[in-house]
Structure formats: structure tokens, C-alpha cells
Amino acid sequence: MYRVKNLDLASKGKDMIEWAERNMPVLMRIRKEFEETKPLTGVRVGAVLHVTKETAVLARTLLAGGAEVWLAASNPLSTQDEVAAALATEGIRVFAWRGESDDEYFWCIERIASSNPDIVVDDGGDLHVFLHEKAPDTAEKVLGGTEETTTGVMRLKALESSGMLKYPVIAVNDSKTKYLFDNRYGTGQSTLDGIMRATNVLIAGKIVVVAGYGWVGRGIAIRARGLGARVIVTEVDPVKALEAVMDGFDVMPMSEAAKVGDIFITATGNIDVIRVEHVLTMKDGAILANAGHFNVEISVLDIENIAVSKRTIRNNVNEYLLPNGKRVYLLAEGRLVNLVAAEGHPSEVMDLSFANQALAIKYLVENRGKIVNRVHRLPEEIDYAIARLKLRSMGIEIDSLTEKQLEYLKSWK
Ligand code: ARJ
């Protein structure tokens, strides 16, 4: 059971997955353990994730652990069709292709929901919300869920505080070995990669405006600076704004930044961060991109409404002619530029994120019935164990505390 673009792409997809596996040593180690102990025997996992070569390595690992795996995309434009085809030939129930319409996107999610999953894995919360709103009886029977990203965790916490959360969720995003690496270094590199593949413009000397100074914004700001850009940060949080200033970035309101920026990148998780009023004051040729989970940070519909004309000038680059005669360039239709115009985060960083996913799923299965219906973090021991495994895979050793040091830390004297 599957629906993908073209099964003939499978062999190319297998090569892509093999390449990712080379760079995901922690997850591969977990796979070996799963093969031996089969902790997921009889468990049906329904997952909505970006269908990339890295996600394929996770899917193969869950399969190796004995699970039945159902997979749909967490964005209509992020599927790597070669990978989806490869997975379809390996017994994974995959429903995903690049360029799904909105209806098709939710049709695929519905396939996952109606498989009656024991465990639900989500990136962004669309599957969790679908189950709670449209299939409450199915949600009732779910053992537990995981959530990959900040936006999804925010939605689940809102469900939790309304008292409506129907199963326990592990916020994978909130592991240190997730957000400190994936959100920062992963997005930092893949976002610049997406902008460069889409436009091939020189970053050096450009003024790059980064909206939001959370972990994602920080990663983008340091990488843009590393490539020689002059970086402006916009924020609403005074502490984060102060951090950005002391990290050496210019900080100002979007209304000011709009007038001077060459490249704008949103990373706030909020709506309408770049609005028409900003776009109208931008320089001719300004480039707009989004790195947040949903395509809501740049007010794309409003731009469409005022634009005199629109055309696609390159893959993933839409040009809008504004009533004031200036042109702006929107990348990847305002969807996550790193997954649409590039390949998402590099495998090395997804190794950490998906090690968290695999171990969170195992944890939920092992502790079934014992976890309250709230949003939890993965236990810290597991988080730290993942960091140790990653260091070991990199050939890096660290010190450990002596008995005397341990005593010293515990003493109040
Ligand atoms: C799969 C990816 C990849 C990739 O972990 C990242 C996150 O939090 C998501 C926000 O939607 C995207 C997800 N991500 C980034 N890169 N998922 N494969 N290569």
C-alpha cells in the first residue's frame, strides 16, 4: 500500500539513503540494537515527516525494530520522490510526492490516521491535530506520540492546556541533542544552502535580515555572517534582542530593516512577520525566504493580491512586480526554503534528531499505560546518552569527574 510519484526512481533513492546512512552513525547503532531486541514488534507507527533520505534512515530503523511503518509528508513540497519510491519497495506504507495540492496533502495524512496507529510521529502537528479533531476515536487508542519541531510542540502544549490531549507526547524538539544542533546548526546550514541553490547570489557583502533570534534564527545569523553578510536581527523578545546585540548583530524593527535588507529570512514560528507594508518599502530585487515550519511568516497572499504580475524566473524563485515598479523575489513559495530548495538538514545533524525519535518511540512502547497524557521531554539520561554516542562516533573523548570533584559539587561548605 503506497502512493508515490514514480517507482522507477527507487534505485536512485536507495543510493541517496545509503549516503545518508554513512553519516548517521548513532541511528545506525540504534538500528543494530533494534534488529537484535525487536522492541517495536507488533507496533504500528504512523508518521508524518519530511520524506527525505534522513527520514528514510529512521523509517528503516523502525522497521528493523519490528514496527509496521506508515509515512506521509509534513510539507507538500519537501518530498524527495526518489526516497519515497525506495521506501515503497521496502514495505513502508508511504503516501507522499513532491507538489501535493492542499487537498492531497491532507488526503495523505488521513491515510496515516486511518491506519489506526499505536504510535504517532509528527513534524509540525498536522497529524496530531487531525487525530484530535477528525478522528477522536482513533486518537483515544493511540499509545503515545512524538513531535519533531518547535511549531508542533507549541500546538500540542495548547492542546494540553485546553485539557484535550488524548495521549502522552514526547517533544523530541525539546531534547538538548535536538534543538541545540538541528534547529541551530542544521537550519543554519540548510537555509543558506537553499537560498544559494535557488538564487546562486553571492552572500558576501549582502545585508541579510533574520527575523527571530530563537535557535533557528541564531543558526542562520551565524552562518550568514560566516559567509560575509552583514546581518540584521529583528525580534519582539527583549532578552533575545539583547543577546543578538551582544552577539554583534544589528537589531532594529522590521519596518527599518525592510528598507535596507537584500535578503530576508523569517524564523519566528509566527504569522505575518513580513507584511505588504514592509515589502513596499524594500529595495528593488529584495529576496524573501522562510525557514519556519509553516508558510505563514511572509504574508504571501497579500503580496499576491497587490502584485501587478508574477512569474517563475528560476526553480523555486517567483518574481513579483509591485505597483511601485519594484520587483521582489520569493523563494520556495514562502515554504521552508531549506527543505524545498535544498535537501533539508545534513544527515549528521538529523542523526541526533532521529536518534531521539527512535528512542522516544521505544520509550513510549516500553512505558505504555504508565505515562500521563501530557507533553513530556525525553528523559535526560537518554538525551545525554545520545550526545555520548555522537561524540564517540566522532572519535572525541571527554573527561569525567573524579570522586573528589563529585564530592565537592555536592557539598555546601
Ligand atoms: C527530515 C528534516 C530534515 C531532513 O528536524 C527538522 C525540524 O524540526 C523540521 C521543521 O519542519 C524539519 C526537520 N528537518 C530538517 N531537515 N526532516 N529530513 N533532512
Image: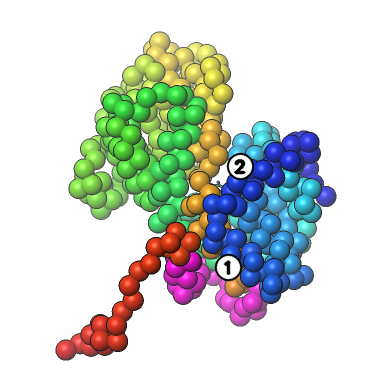
Q: Identify the residue at the far right of this view.
A: 1
Q: Name the element at disc 2.
A: loop
Assess mark 2: CB under 8 A from ligand 1?
yes
Image point 23% across, 38% down: which residue?
Answer: 250
As displayed, is residue 66 above or below residue 276? below
Question: From where the camera sits, is residue 128 visible?
Answer: no
As displayed, is residue 17 above or below residue 337? below
Image point 45% across, 31% down: which residue?
Answer: 195
- Residue highlighted by disc 2: 75
Report the amino acid beneath label 2: Asn
Q: Name the element at disc 1.
A: helix
Residue 220 as seen in the image, left or right of residue 20? left
Report the amino acid beneath label 1: Leu
Disc 1 to disc 2, C-alpha distance: 24 Å
Span highlighted in magenta in the image: 365-389
Crowd class of label 2 (few under 14; some 14 to 19; many from 20; radius 10 Å):
many
- The quadrant of the image that shows the C terminus is bottom left
Q: Give the label, 1 or 2, closer to the camera.
A: 1
Where on the picture, by quarter, is residue 235?
top left
Earlier-in-chain disc, 1 versus 2? 2
- Between 373 and 63, the one nearer to me in the picture: 63
